[in-house]
Amino acid sequence: MNNYIVKETDVNKRLDMFLSSFLSISRNKIQSLIKSKHILVNNKNVTSSYKLKLNDIISYQIEEEKQDFIPNSDIKIDIVYEDEDIVIINKPQGLVVHPSIGHHQDTLVNGLKYVFDDKLSDINGEYRLGIVHRIDKDTSGLLCIAKNNKAHLFLQDQLKDHTMKREYIALVEGNILEDEAIIDIPIGRDKNSPLKMSVTKLGKEAYTKIKILHRYENYTLIKCALKTGRTHQIRVHLSYINHPVVGDKLYNKNPNKLYDKGQLLHAYKLELIHPTTKKIMSFEAPLPNYFNQVLSSLK
């Protein structure tokens, strides 16, 4: 069971409505879980209409939904490069990478199945066909897709030994004084939210190198290079140093001040060793139009 302690901002909210928003699951699904005793409050059964009280402990157990297949979706995919082993994708902001609880369609994997059929690696199962690494729904930019299991394993090893290099561009709140900095702080699951990560001594090693590209009056444009690839790593690290990513609704306390459609974070550069030729390949994706428009407004 996962636990969540009710805060002042949650008081008097209906249990089903709160959890539907909190866990990004349909209200009907939440109500079904409450009836089946997979959701408890203070270790007791309650109704869906239960009004939350301060310091209530919500316990919930959610199992992955089972499906016999993942449907194809005709989603436009921006293919930067393709050969017999790999595909390099420029993912748009707003596109989920792979299916998850309550979200089985309209993800990148659904689109990849439509384009490539069964010509994708399946090491990680049908829910993650071809997926070697991920970026968040509202992060745009480059992803490497494996077409076969041999290529997948080779690319996976590069992630583990850090020979695959990934660089991001982000617009953050405030002015970072140093021209270059290294954030070397462990990251783990947030104790109070299943959706968030946080800096914690008990977490896993996380290493982000940042470099200033441009300073605006109240914002800073930076480049981030990853050595490790923890979930939400850049977003957590930048929030921890009090320079959260603009538009980040999870880690920025005032996310909609400048841009309200997701974090301004773009995976612009990807460098890897090709699985077959063993040559170093480097790819870049320019900033999306909406990102450039925000930057133009600051000038």
Image (cartoon, rainbow, N blue to C red):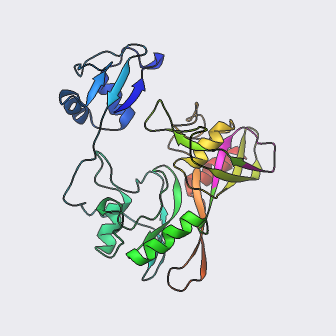
Residue 95: image quadrant is: bottom left
Decide whether residue 128 is among the magenta residues: no
Residue at image location 44% in from the left, 38% down from the top: 195
- Magenta residues, start to end: 169-182
Residue at the far bottom in the pictured view: 277
Residue visible at 65% across and 47% down in the picture: 171
Q: Position of residue 166 (x, y in %)?
A: 60, 63
Task: State the count of labels.
Answer: 0
Name the one closer to the observer, 292 or 13: 13
> What is the quadrant of the N terminus in the image?
top left
Is 79 located above or below residue 252 in the figure?
below
Q: Position of residue 295 (x, y in %)?
A: 66, 49
- Residue 126 at x, y = what percent? 29, 63
Left or right of 100? Residue 182 is right
Residue drawn at the location 44% of the way across and 69% of the way down = 145
Which image quadrant for residue 259? top right
Which residue appears farthest toward the front when viewing the image?
A: 202
The residue positioned 35% from the left and 24% from the top of the image is 58
Is any part of residue 147 visible from this angle?
no
Is residue 184 in sight in this rendering?
yes
In the rendered image, residue 171 lying in the magenta stretch gets the answer yes
Q: Is residue 259 left or right of residue 177?
A: left
In this view, 19 is above or below 119:
above
Q: Position of residue 97 (x, y in %)?
A: 41, 56
